[in-house]
Amino acid sequence: MMKRQRIIAALLMSASLSWASAGAAAAKDLLTIDLVNEPTSLDPHVQWNPDSYFVYRNIFDNLLTRDDSGAIVPQIATEWTYLSDNEIEFTIRDGVTFHDGTPLTAEDVAFSVKRITDPGFSSPQLSQFNSITDARVSADNKVVLVTNGAYPAVMAQLVKLSIVPQHVVEAVGNDAFNLAPVGSGPYKFSDWSRGVSVTLAVNEDYWGDKGVFKEAVFRAVPDAATRMANLQAKAADLVVTINSDMAAQLDGRDDVKVLSVLTERVAYFALNAQKPPMNNPDLRLAVAHAMDKEGITEGILGGYDEPVGQFMSPAHFGWVDGLESPGYDPDKARELVAAAGEEAKVPFPILTSPVYDQRVVQAIQQMLTDAGFNASIEMTDMATWLKDMQAGPEGIPVSAFSRWSCACQDADGILFPTLHSSSGWASAGDTALEAALEAGRSTLDEEERLAEYTKAQAILNEQNYLIPLYQAAIIYGAAAGLEWTPTPNESLFLNRMDWAE
């Protein structure tokens, strides 16, 4: 099937099949979702990774959210007004209660903002919110956010800001809150069986659209073949992160289907420019020339994904048509490696985790080996991968396969945290690049922002601090009865799902 046909077909909702065993009631009470790993955190202000986000985003409401078309729309904030370039007043929704029955107030909103932006709290998401300098309650149902100058990406970032109950966090502490989170979202936390699953129960008192499933279970199933087997055996209703080969196995079946969408997530090859051999710009250029992006997307990924020549996707504000990183040129790559001599023979480990498609990682290793690098694969669990990749220039590994999504669809959310030295993820150390990134997040003028991001991308494509590879598609396997349209921001909103009998 051609790629366009697959994508269109993936967005069509088909006939139904109950997950429950034969003879069960017609109603679909339990939705079972197989993730790759268990969440590393259920506190939405702590870790930022898909397996955590898939779960906790259903427990918590955010200040703003995106609808299925990608537009920023109200959630806890019903409206907002710019008081000045750096002050925005939000009106807080009335009638929202946390899962313990207490009202959600403007004070909870201000507390949530101050918590995630507190350097002492050490949120891995800090670089995405650190332009916010204050949050104050200005009336019973109003909160003013203050930024350190004009911050054009603030609305795009606030779609990720979950509101937590101040009274619970302060009473139990951060560690206990992570183990038993209390939110105001469409589903309540029920149980966390460590290493196995997280169970959520529908919030019958939710202020918005209520979930149709009484319970949802998110299971940790690291092996993709096992996730596929669970789906085909009707032991799972939705499985994440299947590859194109597995998707092909579902073609022609009436009881299961493939759902796919191009996301804002960009796959890239991360390099630490402070460590040998990647502190040599010629060798970074060699890496760029060694990457056969078309070979990866068409030959390995089945045409679901799209090669990119800049470190963002067309789903982001800041995408500039025509910008291209160094192209595939294996002869030039070998020439550059040979010219570097012994310097290029330094061991070149590629950090990876089972959550990533190891077919791609193995292809990258082979491309680097063919170019003359001493490349090897270093496998670790996702928690260790995250820790290492946020360890700053001295701790970040020489290289790693990675995929980045800010769930904000703005250039600031992908470029700033990965390339600016204020972030633990960054190792480039390029002052000109950082100046462009700072300027791009400091004006509300869209043309000026585009000019700065064009400049930043040009520096990145010249220096190759990381190598953009492709706009990632996410492929799900689903029971035929599940009615759900995947979105570019990769959210699994349970209350936007339905079941057709």
Image (cartoon, rainbow, N blue to C red):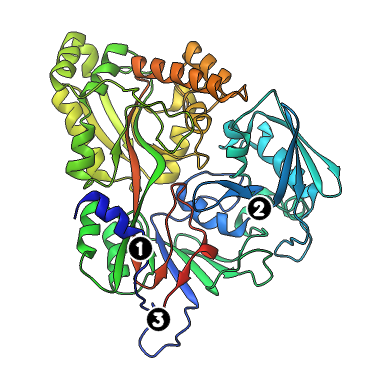
Among the 4 quarters of the image, the one containing residue 233: bottom left
Quadrant holding the C terminus? bottom left
Identify the residue at horizontal 37%, vertical 57% (top origin): 240
Q: Are marks 1 and 3 in contact (CB under 8 Å)?
A: no
Residue marked by disc 3: 20
Q: Secondary structure at mark 3?
A: loop
- The answer to the question of whether label 1 and label 2 lie on touching residues, with beta carbons closer than 8 A, is no
Q: Nearer the viewer, mark 1 or mark 2?
A: 1
Q: Is residue 403 visible?
A: yes
User: Which mark sits nearer the N-terminus, 1 or 3?
Assistant: 1
Q: Is label 3 or label 2 in front?
A: 2
Q: Is residue 171 above or below residue 200?
A: above
Quadrant hosting residue 320? top left
Mark 1 to mark 3: distance in Å?
A: 23 Å
Disc 1 from disc 2: Cα separation: 27 Å
Q: Badge 3: few (under 14), some or many (20 or more) residues near its Cα, within 10 Å?
A: some
Give the number of callouts: 3
For the residues marked 3 and 2, what is the alpha-carbon distance in whole angstroms? 33 Å
Give the residue at the far bottom of this rendering. Answer: 23
**Residue 476 in the image: x percent, y percent?**
35, 58
Q: Going by the image, does 149 lie left or right of 384?
A: right
Q: Amino acid at mark 3?
A: Ala
> Can residue 274 be seen?
no
Residue linked to disc 2:
75
The residue under the point 60% across, 59% down is 59
Q: Position of residue 499 (x, y in %)?
A: 45, 73
Q: Amino acid at mark 1?
A: Leu
Camera-nearest residue between 334 and 381: 334
Q: Which residue is mark 1?
A: 12
Query: Which comes sooner in the sequence, label 1 or label 2?
Result: 1
Q: Earlier in the sequence, mark 3 or mark 2?
A: 3
Who's the residue at 52% across and 73% down the image?
Answer: 213
